[in-house]
Image (cartoon, grey):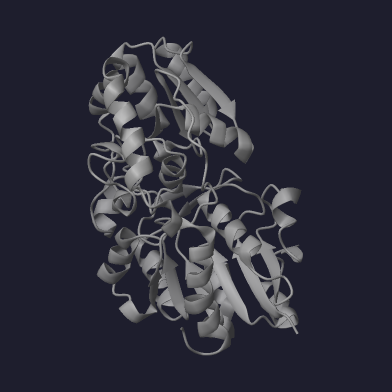
Amino acid sequence: MRKKIVWINQYPSRKGGAERVIENIILSLDKSEYCNILLYKFDEELSNEFIGLFDIAFPIVNLHKQLSSINPDNIQIHNYIDEYIFQELGKYRDISFIFLHDHKIFCPREHKYKGIGKETCKKEMSTLDCFACCGLIQKKKSREFSIVTPHKLSKYQNFIKSCRGVVVASKYMKRQLIDSGFEQKKIFYHALATNFLNIAPVKAIPNEVTYFGQLETGKGVDILIRALALCGKEIIVNIIGDGKSRESLENLALKLGVSHLVNFLGRLQDRDLKEYIGRSVACISPSRSPETFNLAALESLSCGTPVISSKVGAYEEWYIENITGELFESTNFKELSNILSSIYDNREKWEMYRRLIRENFETEKFSVGVYRDFFMRKVLNLTITGKAT
């Protein structure tokens, strides 16, 4: 009989990095051995392509009853930090793994940047500091507001500590957990995987760069647009992805007089995305919210393209000084502007980065197969057989 894995995820669509992780794992599992069941938030936009990955998919109605009916062997909770979810899991804690893809249990604002000024927040969570940056109030889809306090997030942390284990993708996130009192033996760390491997190198188009990802404030695309305007060079910026900030970003490009240089391309299929990444002089990761891994950077490097990234979060997972690209201080668009200018003025340097990436960046250790082995040994075996291997 096949083992039943329940995947609890807020979004029933390929919204971001968390969903790409789920997709990669499921595609690598033997369907004759495992039955994959998705439970998702009922009012989120649904993608048939994403839910088609699963044997069965249901909206969450009464989680406790649904789990009792399914009788799962293993529960994977991705990207869904919610009081109701935690309350309903109850007796299933011992077979539950929480995958932490973001800062929701460390920051009432969820994204670790300040409400006023939008600068990256590097402070530890406290009621006084969070209140000072207007971080306790969250706006819901229904236009209602809710209060999220450090005390409430501490309760979430305590629940997660009682589960079988926590999976993170970076040393940065592991440090966050240890600093918050999590037991090291319950923390399972492994870098994420990409299927962007063994891609034939292509010649870069001069003075063209690409951002790909969600268009949300924390991703810092506004910083990129301001840096482009400041540098004054004829550099083409491709922006791939969508999100609630798209309209404001389009207006910003128009206001700063660079709309003719910025291409908003929306979401693309992987085949087209790889083409844009490969032909770019560099891919930009301008996040003000600390990246908990930065899958986009890994996918760029796997295509042989250098990365220009803000120096915050988990950049140490993929960054190799003088080889993989360049870093700038978070939210410092003047510093980013200087790096963009070098793309225009010093093509030889960026060609050198491409060559060094091909020679030195070990893409194979980020393969789906390597991650699958980790998932099987450390996560599935621990809950199904009682011990990790």
Residue at position x 39%, y 18% from top?
207
Residue 79, image x, y percentages? 52, 59
Residue 2, image x, y percentages? 73, 80
Quick check: 8 above or below 196? below
Locate the N terminus and report the quarter of the image it occupies: bottom right
Residue 360, image x, y percentages? 32, 47
Q: Which residue is at the front of the view, 234 or 367?
A: 367
In this rendering, would 53 be left or right of 288? Answer: right
Quick check: 53 above or below 178? above
Residue 109, image x, y percentages? 39, 50
Quick check: 47 above or below 8? above
In this rendering, would 58 be left or right of 76? Answer: right
Residue at position x 51%, y 71% from top?
373
Residue 288 seen in render: no
Residue 271 placement: quadrant: top right
Residue at position x 41%, y 42% from top?
301
In this rendering, would 80 be left or right of 302? Answer: right
Residue 133 placement: quadrant: top left
Q: Tag count in the figure?
A: 0
User: Which residue is most to the bottom?
Assistant: 386
Q: Which residue is at the front of the view, 231 or 178?
A: 231
Q: Which residue is at the front of the view, 293 or 123?
A: 293
Residue 37 seen in render: yes
